[in-house]
């Protein structure tokens, strides 16, 4: 036994109690120290977390040890997933906006109160809406056309409405509302200006055709009644029959020209591999002009350049023939008609010049319209249908060619067809 243990042995249980107390104290101090360390550890990491939460960037998620390492790792993973999702959404939204902007039609998104939420550039242009200023404004304040206002308020959107915007009345728009999602609407605006023009032209054309055919038909049935009702002698009957035949021929010509125009519109454009022999086309045109003139005019033909045209022979024969025929028909006897062909590898032209009655400048832009005639009765006298130049223009356009018209009233006219280089091919001579 050591000297130091001796007092304890003497003191007995009191000494034992002392040493237990010391151990407890040490334990408590150690516990307090651990608790303090833990408190510091957590407080440091909580601070890190707080700082990061103020500016949460996935790349800057803090690092730590122990349980906080797991927390931060989870956070990092969560943030990365979130960022990826956000990027995908942004991509989708930007893509949708880009698609909206690229649409050929105007698009406006309206909220439940028909206020503008978004619109593309076309809609801005068509409706005079300004995206920066007008978002949040009711569409009926921006497009005030009463028909449109009624349409928006009607809640019946199966049909579209047509209107001409007040700020741009030359534009015809077709507007359609499409409800979608929860109480939202898509307003689609389509430019139908051209469509309306074509529709008007179609209506005018049908009215014109009916009128043109009805006139000879009325005359024809009038003569028929006369021949049926009156007891006419042979000579008068023959005279009436001749007049009737004239009207029938006129109707036939109109129908033939209409069919020719319709064929020009509905058949594929002549390809470049078909060759039109210019020498025979010019000879044919001249022969036809001479037959029509019956010696009343001086007709000349000059051709330069050993080239042919690529295209459809029947169409060019009709175009050249119509131009030459007009020159004869609108040139008084004794006048002159000159046919000129000039071709180089850079292009070709065929012109018909006459010393006829000429055309007032105001009529020139409209001459190629169907049934347009400067002088209706003169055209009728010459057996004209008013469709000749429309056929010429169409046939030339199908050969990439233009028609120029120069004229001086009382002096004469010149019609020039110009062909581009792509339609000119070196002439081929039969062996
Ligand atoms: N060489 C010309 N000289 C004067 N007027 C012409 C000539 N060619 C055409 N025109 C005018 O253009 C109109 C339209 O011509 P076109 O389409 O061939 O019809 P039409 O059947 O009346 O000849 C003619 O009615 C005529 O008024
Ligand atoms: Mg004619």
Image (spheres, rainbow, N blue to C red):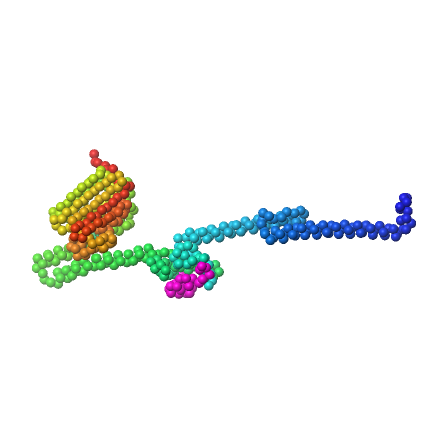
- The part of the image, by quadrant, that contains residue 160 is bottom left
The answer to whether residue 291 of the structure is visible from this angle is no
Residue 186, image x and y in percent?
Answer: 43, 58
- Residue at position x 46%, y 53% in the image: 97
Outermost residue to the right = 10
Q: Is residue 283 left or right of residue 169?
A: left
- Where, quadrant-wise, is the N terminus in this rendering? top right
- The part of the image, by quadrant, that contains residue 230 is bottom left
Residue 139, image x and y in percent?
Answer: 43, 62
- Residue at position x 58%, y 49% in the image: 58
User: Is residue 149 within the magenta segment?
Assistant: yes
Outermost residue to the top = 431
- The part of the image, by quadrant, that contains residue 375 is bottom left
- Where, quadrant-wise, is the C terminus in this rendering? top left
- Residue at position x 22%, y 51% in the image: 389
Residue 397, image x and y in percent?
Answer: 27, 47
Number of numbered labels in the structure image: 0
User: Is residue 191 within the magenta segment?
Assistant: no
Q: Is residue 44 left or right of residue 430?
A: right
- Residue at position x 35%, y 56% in the image: 192
Residue 105, image x and y in percent?
Answer: 39, 55
The answer to whether residue 86 of the structure is visible from this angle is yes
- The residue nearer to you, when weighing 235 against 89, is 89
Q: Is residue 180 left or right of residue 51?
A: left
- The residue nearer to you, when weighing 35 against 215, is 35
52 in relation to 346, above or below: below
- The residue nearer to you, when weighing 9 against 316, is 9
Q: Which residues are magenta?
A: 133-158
């Amino acid at each position: 036994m050591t000297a130091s243990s001796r007092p304890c042995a003497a003191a007995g249980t009191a000494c034992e109690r002392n040493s237990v107390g010391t151990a407890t104290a040490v334990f408590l101090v150690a516990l307090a120290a651990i608790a303090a360390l833990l408190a510091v550890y957590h407080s440091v990491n909580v601070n890190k977390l707080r700082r990061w939460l103020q500016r949460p960037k996935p790349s800057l998620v803090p690092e730590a040890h122990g349980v906080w390492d797991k927390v931060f790792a989870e956070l990092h993973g969560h943030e990365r997933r979130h960022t990826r999702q956000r990027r995908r959404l942004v991509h989708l939204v930007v893509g949708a906006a880009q698609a909206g902007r690229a649409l050929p039609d105007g698009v406006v998104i309206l909220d439940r109160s028909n206020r503008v939420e978004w619109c593309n550039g076309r809609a801005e242009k068509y409706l005079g809406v300004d995206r920066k200023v007008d978002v949040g404004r009711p569409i009926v304040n921006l497009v005030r056309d009463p028909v449109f206002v009624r349409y928006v308020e009607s809640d019946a959107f199966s049909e579209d409405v047509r209107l001409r915007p007040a700020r741009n009345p030359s534009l015809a728009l077709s507007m359609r509302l499409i409800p979608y999602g929860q109480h939202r609407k898509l307003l689609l605006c389509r430019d139908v200006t051209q469509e309306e023009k074509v529709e008007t032209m179609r209506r005018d054309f049908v009215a014109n055709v009916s009128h043109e055919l009805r006139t000879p038909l009325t005359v024809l049935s009038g003569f028929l009644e006369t021949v049926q009702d009156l007891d006419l002698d042979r000579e008068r009957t023959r005279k009436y029959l001749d007049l009737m035949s004239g009207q029938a021929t006129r109707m036939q010509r109109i129908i033939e020209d209409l069919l020719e125009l319709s064929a020009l519109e509905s058949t594929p454009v002549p390809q470049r591999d078909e060759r039109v022999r210019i020498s025979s086309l010019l000879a044919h045109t001249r022969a036809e002009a001479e037959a029509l003139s019956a010696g009343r005019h001086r007709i000349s033909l000059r051709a330069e350049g050993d080239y042919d045209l690529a295209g459809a022979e029947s169409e060019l024969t009709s175009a050249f023939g119509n131009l030459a025929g007009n020159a004869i028909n609108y040139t008084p006897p004794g006048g002159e008609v000159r046919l000129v062909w000039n071709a180089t590898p850079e292009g070709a032209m065929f012109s018909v010049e006459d010393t006829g009655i000429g055309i007032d400048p105001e009529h020139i832009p409209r001459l190629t319209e169907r049934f347009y005639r400067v002088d209706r009765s003169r055209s009728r006298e010459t057996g004209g249908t008013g469709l000749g130049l429309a056929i010429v223009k169409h046939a030339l356009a199908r050969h990439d060619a233009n028609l120029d018209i120069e004229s001086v009233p009382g002096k004469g006219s010149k019609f020039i067809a110009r062909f581009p280089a792509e339609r000119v091919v070196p002439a081929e001579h039969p062996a």
